[in-house]
Image: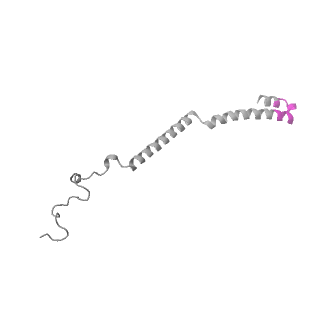
Amino acid sequence: MEAFNALTADETKLTTENIRTVEREFLASAQVLLKSEWRRVKSGEWTFRIAKLLAMIVILVSIAIGCFAAYSTSWPERNSSPQPASSQLGTPLGQATLPQGAAGTKGGSAK
């Protein structure tokens, strides 16, 4: 900006060639400044970075808990399998005990 102020101070120096020289210097300085500022803005402020990191952690932990809950409810517990009745533990297969009153009758009347 100092070069531009010096250029405009004397009207005899206001030629297109002098203006273009100052313009090139100004553009080069602006590009350096904008490049550094863009890097800073692109990465974000510290509070934004921390919030983004915490959000990712919360999301990943929630997904892990959800997967664990879905997995644990989809498989039955080991101790919840049906146990045979205590009266049938000693009887061989196919010889289950009949209820009282039905013993000895095979579809007909007993005499």
From the top left corner, tell me how far across and down residue 7 is, in percent: 82, 30
The image quadrant that residue 103 belongs to is: bottom left
Residue 15 can be seen in this image: no
Quarter that holds the N terminus: top right
Q: Is residue 55 left or right of residue 26?
A: left
Q: Is residue 106 left or right of residue 75?
A: left
From the top left corner, tell me how far across and down residue 44 is, in percent: 60, 36
The residue at 68%/33% (across/down) is: 36
Q: Write down the region rendered in magenta.
A: 7-21
From the top left corner, tell me how far across and down residue 14 is, in percent: 85, 33
From the top left corner, tell me how far across and down residue 39 is, in percent: 65, 35
Residue toward you, 4 or 10: 4
Residue 18 can be seen in this image: yes
Q: Is residue 70 left or right of residue 22?
A: left
Q: On screen, 90 above or below 61?
A: below
The residue at 63%/34% (across/down) is: 40
Residue toward you, 80 or 65: 80
Q: Is residue 11 magenta?
A: yes
Q: On screen, 4 above or below 66?
A: above
Q: Main secondary structure of the magenta part?
A: helix
Quarter that holds the C terminus: bottom left
Q: On screen, 55 above or below 108?
A: above
The residue at 53%/37% (across/down) is: 53
Residue that extends furthest to the left in the rendered view of this protein: 111
Q: Is residue 70 left or right of residue 93?
A: right
**Number of callouts:** 0
The image quadrant that residue 109 belongs to is: bottom left
Residue toward you, 103 or 25: 103
Q: Is residue 76 magenta?
A: no
Residue toward you, 70 or 20: 70
